[in-house]
């Protein structure tokens, strides 16, 4: 094997090692996208809420489900209608009812679902924005009319059915001002105003046709003093629909700040205590913004077979290099390192000044070098050694102000002196310089 091939193999091996170490220790940047994903620990994910929401419902039953609200409500309504019909015909068609029930249980996760729909249920849905079409809205209203409750927090959404006019509620944008804080109207829950970061300027307006059925549960306060509803409750049929404009309240970043969790506890306290609650999550598809950027070698390292194949190639290459490449011995000359003679040079120059007794010139150069260092390190104007210079140097160097004043007075006196300096003056200047500069 020639030397060029050996060098190429060695360089390739080193490159692989460097890439592996770099990717292993690479720290992913903070993702500030509003994903609202329960698997995301980034600032605007719902990981903390998903982990802690069970503790908020200690005396209630809560189940994590999802991901599609339309499919969930549609299947729920279809299943409940079918079970009601099967109960009516139970005496005559018991086997058919059991067969249908078994089919639904296998196609969807309905743990205790047959009993739950009779006891009424609640849904918690927190999303950035969903597509609210006529069919989804009709299902939501039917679900609510049957005595159930839905809590929905979304942004930029009009809950308005132009075809059936079932829900004339609009989410409008308040211009020319930013949101300062939010609060709940029920002072028995909390009287505190909550300063939530990055709130949008959305607020609700309600048509006169349903104003008597709508109750304002919370307000949003703007910088110009205006307060507008951002949390409302709409009673429809036997149930109620609770709508909010700011899902960002529930994210990891805001949950960990101050007492913001009290606001979330207050919102969830409006859910009926007797209802079985479903928390809508994205557990079936965590990535809402497409595929994330995959780091180098991540695909290989995530697959067990490919990972071991990669390790095998790496080990084989290492053994090949170890046993094939032989080191050629040659005499390596010993080269003495260059010695640092700076100190010796300085001592030689200083001794010349002392022998010639030219203390004034030595002091003059010392002052020049000291002021130049102050200009270079601290950007201090040294053209005038006055009170301004003393104050500026004291602030920037944190040195004793009396020592700085003594140095300035001594230098000014030396410059104005008409007689040459002596050895004592040089020693004193050196002592003053050591006190004000490192």
Image (cartoon, rainbow, N blue to C red):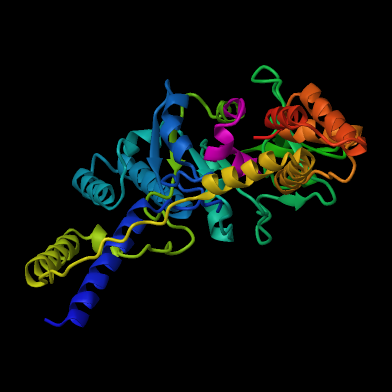
In the image: residue 104, left or right of residue 280? left
In this view, the residue in front, 211 or 409, is 409
In the image: residue 219, left or right of residue 310? right
Residue 28 at x, y percent in the picture = 44, 53
* Rendering quarter of residue 194: top right
In this view, the residue in front, 405 or 377, is 405
Residue pushed farthest left? Answer: 323
Q: Is residue 219 visible?
A: no
Residue 283 at x, y percent in the picture = 38, 49
In the image: residue 66, left or right of residue 9? right
Magenta stretch?
240-262
Residue pushed farthest top? Answer: 188
In this view, the residue in front, 249 or 133, is 249
Residue 32 at x, y percent in the picture = 56, 51
Is residue 260 highlighted in magenta?
yes
Image quadrant holding the N terminus, namely: bottom left
- Residue depicted at 84% across the width and 44% down the height: 382
- Residue depicted at 43% across the width and 64% down the height: 293
């Amino acid at each position: 094997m020639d030397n060029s091939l050996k060098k190429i193999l060695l360089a390739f091996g080193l490159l692989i090692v460097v890439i592996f170490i770099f990717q292993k220790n690479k720290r992913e940047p903070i993702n500030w996208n509003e994903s609202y994903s329960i698997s995301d620990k980034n600032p605007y994910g719902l990981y903390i809420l998903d982990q802690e929401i069970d503790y908020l419902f200690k005396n209630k039953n809560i189940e994590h489900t999802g991901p599609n609200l339309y499919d969930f409500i549609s299947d729920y309504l279809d299943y409940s209608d079918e079970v009601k019909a099967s109960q009516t015909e139970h005496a005559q068609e018991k086997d058919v009812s059991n067969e249908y029930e078994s089919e639904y249980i296998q196609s969807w996760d309905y743990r205790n679902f047959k009993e739950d729909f009779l006891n009424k249920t609640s849904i918690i849905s927190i999303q950035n924005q969903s597509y609210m079409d006529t069919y989804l809205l009709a299902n939501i209203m039917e679900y609510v009319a049957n005595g159930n409750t839905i809590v929905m927090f979304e942004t930029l959404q009009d809950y308005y059915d132009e075809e059936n006019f079932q829900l004339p509620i609009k989410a409008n944008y308040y211009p020319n001002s930013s949101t300062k804080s939010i609060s709940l109207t029920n002072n028995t829950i909390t009287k505190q105003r909550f300063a939530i970061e990055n709130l949008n300027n959305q607020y609700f307006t309600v048509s006169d046709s349903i104003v008597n059925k709508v109750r304002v549960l919370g307000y949003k306060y703007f910088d110009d003093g205006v307060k507008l509803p951002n949390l409302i409750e709409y009673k429809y049929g036997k149930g109620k629909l609770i709508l909010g404009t700011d899902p960002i309240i529930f994210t990891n970043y805001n949950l960990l700040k101050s007492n913001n969790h009290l606001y979330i506890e207050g919102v969830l306290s409006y859910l009926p205590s007797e209802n079985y609650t479903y928390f809508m999550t994205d557990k079936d598809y965590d990535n809402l913004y497409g595929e994330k950027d995959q780091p180098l070698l991540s695909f290989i390292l995530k697959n067990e077979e490919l990972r071991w194949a990669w390790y095998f190639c790496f080990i084989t290459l290492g053994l090949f290099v170890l046993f094939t490449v032989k080191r050629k011995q040659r005499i390596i000359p010993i080269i003495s390192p260059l010695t640092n003679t700076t100190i010796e040079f300085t001592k030689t120059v200083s001794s010349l000044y002392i022998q010639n007794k030219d203390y004034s010139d030595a002091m003059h150069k010392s002052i020049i070098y000291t002021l130049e260092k102050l200009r270079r390190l601290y950007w201090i104007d040294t053209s005038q050694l006055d009170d301004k210079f003393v104050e500026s140097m004291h602030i920037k160097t944190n040195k004793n102000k009396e020592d700085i004043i003594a140095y300035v007075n001594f230098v000014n006196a030396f410059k104005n002196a008409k007689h040459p300096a002596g050895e004592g003056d040089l020693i004193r200047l050196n002592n003053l310089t050591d006190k004000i500069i490192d």
